[in-house]
Amino acid sequence: MESISFQTCQLKNFFCGACWAFSVVGAVESAYAIKWHTLEELSVQQVIDCSYLDSGCNGGSTNGALKWLYQTKTKLVRASEYNFKAKTGLCHYFPKTDFGVSINGYETQDFSGTEDAMMKMLVDLGPMVVIVNAVSWQDYLGGIIQHHCSSGAPNHAVLVIGYDKTGDTPYWIVKNSWGTAWGADGYVYIKMGENICGYWSKVLLYLRKHSVPSLEERKKYNHGFATSTSFHGVHNLVENGGSGKNSKFRTAIWTSVVSVFIIMACWQVCTRVINYFSWPTTTSVNVQYVENIDFPAITFCNLNRFQTKAVNNLSIAFFLWNIVSAVLHFTSIASDPGEMQEVTDFLKLNKNFSIKEFTKNYGFYLNNSTLLKCSFFGYPCYPEDFEHIFTEYGNCYTFNYNTVSMNKRITTAGRGLSVLFDIKQTEFTDEPSLGFVDAGISFVLHSPLVPPRFDGLGLHSPAGMHAHVSMRRFKTVIQEHPWGECNPSLKLKYHEIYSTYGCLQECKSYYIQNECGCIPFLLPGNGKECDLQQLYNCVSRALYTIEKSELCSMGTYNSTCPVPCEETDFPATISYSTFPSDKAAQFLSAKLSKSALYMRNNLVYIDIKYHEMNYKIMKQQKALTASELLSNIGGQLGLFCGASMITIIEVLEYLFTNSYWMCVFILLKTPRAPEYTNNQPRYREEIQEC
């Protein structure tokens, strides 16, 4: 910026030594004009008469005047209300004036040799009060003072209002208080950069401008709010309809009424807000009747896992498989030292032994000799309609899995899947010492998109029995956190949809891969498959660490695998009848070339069907939504206070305005007054001539 100037009214000093008062009032006028874009002529006489730190027309200090204004919060009134008389008089106070300007802070700074900083301050804050030596100013007629000026002790106060750097000689624009007949219409131009006339060698003062209404203006604002607000009842506090005791009594009554109902409204609002942030929920159960319904996936396993002829050392093979199945059960393995030594010796002699290939080749198989009959909704099905899958029971086979068969639907209750298995007990066996003492088929009903989980969910049908399974479809919908425990953002890497069991599998796979550098074949993943040595030496140890440290937890939102937001289960009831009957045994014996004793020891007949053409939905819902909370709050405010959201905005604006005013009063920076010594003259002695 090349030039800047703030113009204010020019006054005559006459024979009154009050340059200190003129300069201070001029600075206040300028600050007010810059802030409110209105130029007001303020009373210099008020400062002369009332600044008790100064001597009126006999001299004074700009710092003393500013200190008086700041400490007393005196409002400078218009010059028309307190006329200039060019002499010191009695101080007049204007406690009820409608207009006045007070200051809320000031600072003193020394800009000797730093005129660039002074220019910036002038631009940012406006005109500044300075003290100079004006002995040689009496004969000034105009132009720029460049050389002939005293730089002695200061004896005059003026107002620097701007500067001009557009010409060859940059200069300060200074407003004097000797009238327009002096100098350049009352102004003097001083060359910049030379510290001419003792400029800035002494204390420089400037105003810190703050806009704070007077006490009377604040009272008017409060009264206006009370009479115009849509908050019911408040206007009765100020418009009492009369005077005297009755009016005071009415005001007291209305104050009590408004206060009580505000407290009631706040109590009700707080109660509802606290209730909302307790995240309450409700649970609804609905029955949906449909014309057709999706059939679940069903995984079948033989309780006897391995072919007897393929196992030379059953106890070792079953122990190794126990390690593998523990991966799915998420448990660690315990064994006695003798068994451990036997397994160690086995591993030394069979380094290339693969439990996966062994199970696949010598476990239970599904073909026309083990699946004697299969029909779905009256149509035949075949072993090719089942997908092979590894579980804790070894080789298992899933009907209606997501990668083999298209999703199957039925349209009539009471019909579904019928299968007849031959478990071949003489060909397949298991290890009783490890807890496998049953013979039959284990099966589980599950969604086609999630892996089967037998732990706690598997159903069993013994040999020589006809199992009648009646199932229902049950869908659970859980709210996301914090209302419920689910996390809708969770996705699984190797499963199409999220499930707790699938998440646990992937979690287990991740930690085992990090610990052992491989992944057990029962778990999902793309890493190297664990060999027998790694399964025995590392995986079992990793399982123990995962279990002990709870690295793969489930259930709550903060667990590794929280509950899914949506889950479909198939609760079932099962009943049994002897199979085959004596008459059926004769018929099937001729058809299958099997004896009745063989059939009762090896055949398992299973019928699975829907109980009804409907399904249940259990849905967790928010007991209180955000819109309902706002409605409740609005209802309480309307009931007790007649308030709306517009009313709330009015109150907030009112509180903000009053808080701002309060902060301005409390937090304003205290001015820095200069320190005096015995050898240092006070400010009222600094300016002897004006």
Image (tube, helix red, strand yellow):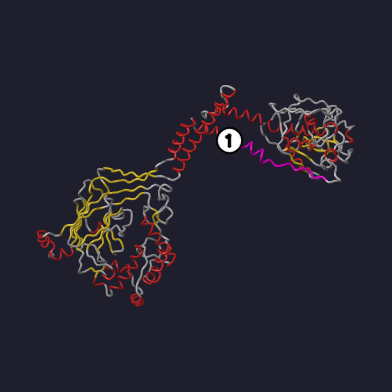
Q: Nearer the viewer, residue 579 or 123?
A: 579
Q: At 66% across and 41% down in the image, what residue appears? A: 667
User: Percent position (x, y) of residue 263?
Assistant: 50, 36
Report the front residue among 403 and 17: 17
Q: Quadrant of the N terminus?
A: top right
Q: Residue at x 83, y 46 (%)?
A: 677
| Residue 427 located within the stretch drawn in magenta | no
Give the left or right position of residue 537, taking residue 107 as reference.
Answer: left
Magenta stretch: dominant SS?
A: helix
- Residue position for label 1: 655
Total numbered circles: 1
Residue at image point 30% right, 61% down: 389
| Quarter of the view holding residue 588 | bottom left
Q: Quadrant of residue 32?
A: top right
Q: Residues within 10 Å of mark 1 (few under 14, many from 20)?
A: few
Q: Which residues are magenta?
A: 654-676
Residue 252 pos. (x, y %): 55, 29
Left-right relation of 319 to 64: left
Percent coordinates x, y for residue 204 in the rendering: 79, 40
Q: Circle 1 — which element?
A: helix
Say if the magenta span includes residue 658.
yes
Q: Amino acid at mark 1?
A: Leu
Location of residue 205 (image quadrant): top right
Q: Report x, y in % for residue 450.
A: 33, 55
Q: Most extreme residue toward the front, as rendered?
A: 245
Q: Nearer the viewer, residue 358 or 644?
A: 644
